[in-house]
Image (tube, grey):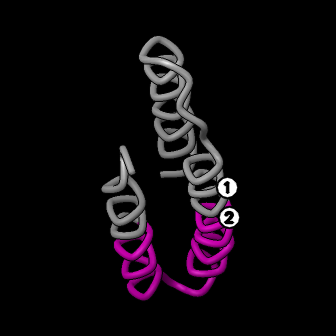
């Protein structure tokens, strides 16, 4: 499946974020843990979109990739 490397990369970033929560104080740790839950849910949604995508030509595939990449970038820019 195209973009199959996306999910492991995002999971790696989530794991990095989880590791940082272990270093944080209690107040920040709770905030980080909540953000990890949100990121994991968004990752699940992105995986769903990828698995449900139906190829309908190169132009639509390019548009799908752009939209998916925009979602990923917005999520990471606002969360981390």
Secondary structure, magenta segment, majority class: helix
| Residue 28 x, y percent position in the rendering | 57, 74
Front one among 42 and 51: 51
| Residue 79 x, y percent position in the rendering | 56, 50
Q: Residue at x 48, y 18 (%)?
A: 57
Residue 63 colored in magenta in the image? no
Magenta residues, start to end: 14-41
Q: Image quadrant of residue 17?
A: bottom left
Measured along the vertical axis of the image, is residue 58 above or below residue 35? above
Crowding at label 2, few (<14), some or many (≥20) Cα neighbours within 10 Å?
A: few
Q: Residue at x 37, y 64 (%)?
A: 13
Direction from residue 47 to residue 15 in the image, left or right: left
Measured along the vertical axis of the image, is residue 79 above or below residue 23? above
Direction from residue 35 to residue 80 in the image, left or right: left
Determine whether the residue tagged by mark 2 lies in a helix, strand or loop: helix
Mark 2 — residue?
A: 41
CB atoms at circles 1 and 2 under 8 Å apart?
yes
Q: Residue at x 46, y 32 (%)?
A: 69
Determine whether the residue tagged by mark 1 lies in a helix, strand or loop: helix
- What residue occupies the far top of the structure in this picture? 59
| Residue 32 x, y percent position in the rendering | 57, 71
Mark 1 — residue?
A: 45
Measured along the vertical axis of the image, is residue 65 above or below residue 10? above
Residue 40 colored in magenta in the image? yes
Direction from residue 32 to residue 6 in the image, left or right: left
Q: Residue at x 41, y 68 (%)?
A: 11
């Amino acid at each position: 499946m195209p973009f199959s490397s996306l999910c492991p990369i995002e999971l790696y970033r989530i794991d990095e974020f989880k590791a940082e929560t272990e270093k944080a104080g209690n107040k920040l740790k709770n905030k980080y843990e909540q953000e990890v839950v949100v990121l994991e849910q968004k990752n699940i949604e992105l995986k769903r979109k990828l698995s449900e995508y139906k190829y309908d030509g190169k132009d639509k595939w390019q548009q799908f990739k752009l939209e998916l990449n925009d979602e990923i970038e917005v999520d990471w820019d606002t969360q981390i």
